Amino acid sequence: MGPTLEASALIWWGAAQQNDAFSATSIDALLSEATARAEREVEAAPTDSSRLAGLFWLGTSEGYRARQAELHGHYWRAARDARRMRAALSRALALDSSCVDCRLGLAIYDYALARAGVLARLVAQVIGLGSGDAARARQWLRRVSESGSVARLEAQWVYANALLRESDSDGSPREEARRIVGDLAARFPENPVFRRFLDSAVPPP
């Protein structure tokens, strides 16, 4: 849990500076430690509830690793880490189908596959990841953004970005995206990521 949250903070700080290379080595090291720690927790879990927690953090750390790999153009590694994320979070949901937070990583995975570029789709097909489902992903993202606990804020951000991407032919998703991020910007006024989003999401004339 600790290393995952530290890595997440660095990722957000890099995004705020628009610097994809920010602390990349430190982030990788933190996520490697987080993954190893979560795997040990899953193996040693004495109860289903503690195993569920371990699987959630394992899936979360693997999801961030996939994100980092994709960001730097390492598509094979991203696909491998995404598959591990899916496996961990699917196991978590098999233990407790009411784990709303567990659906965030799966929704991101689903949406990314559905909207991936040609090379990323080819890698996904070769490695057996499938093609994704954007509509299902948005449904899950909305659910986590409304009812999640640990993952709610991140789900709101990802959901807003998905809505903006889908808004070319319909203005209502754009307006909902602006509302969601407007709320985030009001809560976190020092975060430039949200302000840049609002500036870029101005409705076309």
Image (cartoon, rainbow, N blue to C red):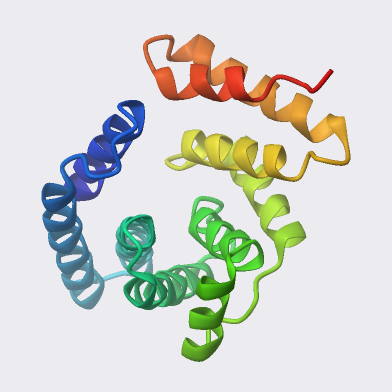
Residue lying farthest right?
Answer: 170
Above or below, 49 against 5 in this view is below
Q: Position of residue 88 (x, y in %)?
A: 40, 72
Number of marks present in the image shown: 0
Above or below, 170 against 70 in this view is above
Residue at the spot x=57%, y=75% of the render?
A: 121
Q: In which quarter of the image is residue 54?
A: bottom left
Above or below, 175 against 126 in this view is above
In the rendered image, the quadrant that contains the C terminus is top right
Above or below, 179 against 25 in this view is above
Residue at the spot x=65%, y=76% of the render?
A: 131
Q: Quadrant of residue 198?
A: top right
Residue at the spot x=19%, y=40% of the render?
A: 6
Q: Position of residue 196 (x, y in %)?
A: 50, 21
Q: Where is residue 173 in the image (x, y as percent from the top left)?
A: 79, 35
Q: In this view, does 120 lie to the left or right of 80?
A: right
Q: Is residue 36 left or right of residue 19?
A: left
Depth order, front residue of 17/109: 17
Q: In which quarter of the image is residue 170?
A: top right
Q: In this view, does 17 lie to the left or right of 70?
A: left
Depth order, front residue of 47/128: 128
Depth order, front residue of 84/1: 84
Residue at the spot x=16%, y=71% of the render?
A: 40
